Image: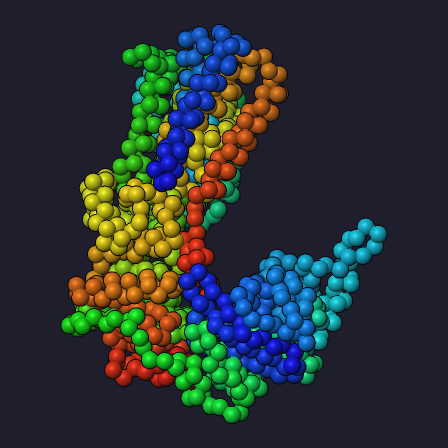
Amino acid sequence: MLLHASGISKRFGGVQALSNVSLTASVGEVMALIGENGAGKSTLVKILTGVYQADEGHIVLAGEPTNFTRPQDATAAGISAIHQEPTVFEDLSVAENIFVGMLPCGGRLGLIDWSEMRRRSRELLAEIGVDIDPATPMRHLGVAERHLLTIAKALSTNAQLFIFDEPTASLSHQEIHHLYGIIERLKRAGKAIVFISHKFDEIFAISDRYTVLRDGFHVEEGRIEETDEAALVRSMVGRTLEQIYPKAAVEIGEIVLEVSGFRHETEFDDISFDLRRGEILGFYGLIGAGRTELMEAIFGLTRPAAGRLLLKGHPLRNSDPADSMAAGLAYVPEDRQHHGAILAMSIRENVALPSLDKLSRGVFLNRAAETDLADRYQKRLTIKASDSEQLVAELSGGNQQKVVVAKWLASDPRIMILDEPTKGIDIGSKAEVHRVIGQLVKGGMSIILVSSELEEVLGIADRIVVMHRGRITGRFQREEATAEVVMSAAAGT
Amino acid sequence: MSAAVRWISGQRESALGVVIILLLIVIGLRAPNYLAPANLLNVLINASFLMLLVLGQLIVLLTRGIDLSPASVLAFTGMFLAKLSHAVPETSALVYILLGLLMGTVLGALNGTLVAGAGIPPIIATLGTMTVYRGLIFLLSGGAWISEHEMSVPFKSFPTGVRVVLPNIVWVTIICAFAAWLFLRYTRAGRALYAVGGNPAAARLAGVSIKRAEFLAYCISGAIAGLCGYLWTARFAIAYTQAAEGREFAIIAACVIGGVTITGGKGTVAGVILGALFLSIIESSLPFVRVNPFLQMAISGFVILIAVAVNSRSERSTGRQILPPEAAPEPRETS
């Protein structure tokens, strides 16, 4: 056994990310690490690669107890992680990317030995069976080739344990098969592999053993031939819904939004659904399923290649967010840090921004009306600030998020698209967000809830639409939706 | 704490005001004749150009842009109007002002089209037009100078003509600064500039048109440069190809000294006016304290670098991450 991690626990503030988790990896074997979003897989990987330090537990590598305090320690010990989106230096060559940080130097002056670097690059690339000229600029390489390069880089550091963190998310079918081939090679070369994936076909195709995590706990492990998909889904999802997802009883009304035949060149295809008054429509899917891209198109941020939008039966032509807002739509983006608040502005200016049409007198602003609006929403969402003139930059993270939500609520939309509204916030705040969502639909608003958290969608949505690779692969009424069916629709099986 | 932070940031302008007064005292000790009313008025007249030009630059900088072309626009417009004054001597000052504004707006609109329409990075777009406009002056003039005796009396006399205590040019500056303040504080278009510069993605989501804001900003910057084209040429009674060449640096530096961030979304009219005043006083006083002309340039540059360094230090403390680590985004899987 090459790696034996046991009793690993890790806490972040009030959140127990991992509790007494173990993971093993053996030479010449692929260990699949399986779990839902938030199960703790990434945290575990980060501990194994020295990014985080475990609060408790032991990591034994090749019989030696280890304690990584920095990522470099893990690399030196022979652990290498290959991530979903490899980070590379676009404008440097393949060879430079492989050897960055340990450029071979020679001669008395210690200058870079270019011919040596190219020679060793060629050797490493040959080792994994790819034919790329080491002098090629990185920019010219596709995602798959970049993955291969990361693997070559790992080989150059003499890695013994390879951790693949959802490496196939952005790969084509053919590229995935090439990757399988390389993993086979690595196995035969006596390396140990940990493979993280949501996709059952992949797990069954290449793994020898599996470990399931759920909510930071180690649920089970075993040999892959002794289990099947249904059993894996059960142990991944496992528990019943708790009371953190209160569902408000709301009368569902007429259809307010109809999306038909939405298609995008690269992101999604054949999307049709409708939304009713007072309804919470959940959109579930794995990362990269195309949900955010779809919502951006519906809101007019991007233009779909085809498709029609009917708002209360009338066609809506929104080539711009301003049109959508005028029609009563609001979009709270997933990436609140970049798309959310304007930090250099006050709470008042942020909250008023989407509502300036209503608040202003012609081209002139109405500060009194802005203050009034901001004060109301500051109170309603209990934003902690001295007053609405305080700069958003001075607020705490949680309160900044509230400002973002407040500004969209203040625009008084009829339809609100919430993209991952509870991502990265603690359980208490989550319940608060769900309570607000309940209030909103009670007031007659309709909500599209995009979420990667299965329990959230199951807990508060009236209907659930599931997407997989840009297509709708499942539609469920609240009553018929179970974790198992929704999850397998999301996995595209 | 927030009140304290706001107090300090509100103090930036007053602090700059205090620095300016201290500066005047120090200069007065070394060269008392600098503080003579006639000289101070002269300093104020000459500082007016910078104070006007920073208003336009402020508006562009707010959108995360930069305008390198105002000095060229100034020289081009000045040359054109000087030729007009030679050809039609009886033209009134109001016509020059309006024509200057108009020509500047057109030249600025071209910048705006390149940046907002064609999506060319502002520094490249305006570097290009800066050179192009400068080159066009040569086409217009054939390289010749237009000097004092070729300009009409109404053309030359307006900027320094006194009306209610102050020279016209100072009144123009006051009116423009007031208009800019009103625009930025009380209009939707002004608010849009701050929003676009503060966070373009968020502004767009909130229905603010980024292109419109950018286009408008370059038009305004051009208009002010065009206006200055007339005032500058008339004040110094000379039009030539290299007029005001190299002033771009002073314009941008004055903005930065006045607390404008190059990264957009932050800056006030009071700040840039004081920044321009500060820089003008430094530049105009160095000959009085008998500093070697070459050393003068070095000192100006040095002062600017110090001001920028101080500015970027004070910037660093603000701008917190929206999700601090203790809000626990990390234990969540991003995959």
Q: Is residue B121 left or right of residue A93?
A: left
Where A430 falls versus B268 (above or below)?
A: below
Image coords of residue A285 (percent x, y): 38, 74
Where B14 falls versus B68 (above or below)?
A: above
- Looking at the image, the residue that sits furthest to the bottom is A226
Image coords of residue A326 (percent x, y): 23, 56
- Looking at the image, the residue that sits furthest to the right is A108
Q: Is residue A58 left or right of residue B200?
A: right
Considering the image in quadrants, where does the N terminus of chain A appear? bottom right
Residue placed at 54% from the left, 30% from the top?
A: B306
Choose top left, top right, bottom left or bottom right for residue A86.
bottom right
Q: Nearer the viewer, residue A404 or B3?
A: B3
Q: Nearer the viewer, residue B79 or A96?
A: A96
Q: Nearer the viewer, residue A464 or B175?
A: A464
Residue B329 appears in the figure: yes
Image coords of residue A416 (percent x, y): 26, 63
Choose top left, top right, bottom left or bottom right for residue A464.
bottom left
Residue B134 appears in the figure: no
Q: Is residue A225 left or right of residue B116?
A: right
Where A234 falls versus A127 (above or below)?
A: below
Considering the image in quadrants, where does the C terminus of chain A appear? bottom left
Q: Is residue B270 left or right of residue A253?
A: right
Q: How many marks?
A: 0
Residue placed at 50% from the left, 74% from the top?
A: A20
Q: How is the image coloured?
A: rainbow
Residue placed at 27% from the left, 59% from the top?
A: A330
Where A376 falls versus A174 (above or below)?
A: above
Residue placed at 69% from the left, 62% from the top?
A: A99
Image coords of residue A122 (percent x, y): 73, 70
